Amino acid sequence: MSPAAPTSRSPRPSPASTPPRAGGIRAPRLLDWRVRFGVLALIWGFSFLFIKVGTEGFAPFQVTFGRLLFGTAVLVVALVVKRDRLPRGARVWGHLTVAALLLNALPFSLFAYAELTIPSTLAGICNATTPLWGMLLSLVALSEDRPTRVRAAGLGLGFMGVLTVLGAWQGFSGLDVTGTAMALLASFSYAVGWIYVRRTLSGSGASNLSLAGSQVGLATLQLAIVTPLFTSVPESVEILPLLAVIALGALGTGYAMLLQYGVVEEVGPTTAAMVTYFIPVIATAAGVAVLNEQLTWNTPVGAVVVLAGAALTQTRTSRRRPANPPVHREKAADTDTTSRDRPTARV
């Protein structure tokens, strides 16, 4: 759930373009990338279940603060092991503060509040609408992402899927409008955050791990300020919600990000981004099997339509290359590993 700025447009990094220390994380090759990809999908898919269980013992802001705190701890350990240094410059830190709000503090809190009143299955499906919001925003914010007819059709198809999931023909009966709106707003925040990161943090000079770790750390500070203002210390701490929050942070926000780094490095950002389409499937299965959440026919059918539309919005038209492209242009394309390829913390 803590995955990075849009990855689908960026070229696959070549081995020479990924520095062994500062440019990224070289994941151990003990496991095939497909296994790590599957583990990543499972962790992020189960994150919605962890949120649901966490809110049974803690206030939503406390769940968010806990996940960010434990996620930061994992990333700090990785920074120390890699002997990486933090980003430099007030401008970079200012942009990271905004990114932390848009990609971590705000959406994490919104999902936690949403799951007070909606099933984890619905929250997971709402999370899959992020590419659709990104497509809408790209019409204004990113001129290079102007839609083709196929992508525009995907946008329409995706929102038809959302209406199917919500049961629009029934007048949204039985649906908690506030909780659903919060989950959709969280996904919208991710899309805004990704665009912001692409426009402000590309070419910052800091490593992927350094930027992401700093971002999550700043989000933790933001929640450390907000949480005491709106919550009180629990009178008692139940073990199951506590374990859920620890897993949500250490696995879903910390370790999963490190897994994604390795997958992006080995097979490229476009393939790694496909994990997005497995998350709602796993979230739905986990909610039904573990939490006994009810599932009507329109939920899985609508989810399939949403994912199909989201996949179409990510298609790219092929570009013709000159017969003899300049050598320096080829090198520039091969070494483009800016912050838009980096994993960022999301559900």
Image (cartoon, grey):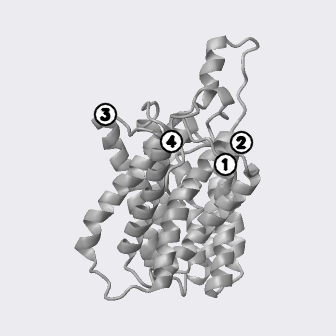
Q: Residue at position x 68%, y 30% from top?
A: 15
| Sequence-first tag of 2 and 3 | 3
Distance Cα–Cα, label 2 vs label 1: 7 Å
The image shows residue 346 at horizontal and vertical percentages of 50, 58
| Sequence-first tag of 4 and 1 | 4
Q: Do residues under tags 2 and 4 come within 8 Å of each other at their CB atoms?
A: no
Task: Decide which of 221, 296 is in the foreground and name it.
Answer: 221
Residue type at mark 3: give it: Gly
Q: Residue at position x 44%, y 66% from top?
A: 67
* Residue 228 in view in this figure: yes
Q: Is residue 236 left or right of residue 11?
A: left
Q: Which numbered disc, 4 or 3, marks the residue closer to the eye?
A: 4
Q: Secondary structure at mark 3?
A: loop
Q: Residue at position x 50%, y 41% from top?
A: 82
Mark 4: few/some/many CA within 10 Å (<14, 14-19, 20+): some
**Residue occupied by mark 4:** 82
Q: Do residues under tags 3 and 1 come within 8 Å of each other at their CB atoms?
A: no
Q: Which mark is residue 89?
A: 3
**Residue occupied by mark 2:** 267
Mark 2: few/some/many CA within 10 Å (<14, 14-19, 20+): some
Distance Cα–Cα, label 4 vs label 3: 21 Å
Q: Do residues under tags 2 and 1 come within 8 Å of each other at their CB atoms?
A: yes
Question: Which quadrant does the N terminus fall into?
Answer: bottom right
**Residue occupied by mark 1:** 272
| Sequence-first tag of 3 and 1 | 3
Residue type at mark 1: give it: Ala
Quarter location, residue 256: bottom right
| Sequence-first tag of 2 and 1 | 2
Task: Decide which of 148, 220 is in the foreground and name it.
Answer: 220
| Sequence-first tag of 2 and 4 | 4
Q: Residue furthest left?
A: 229
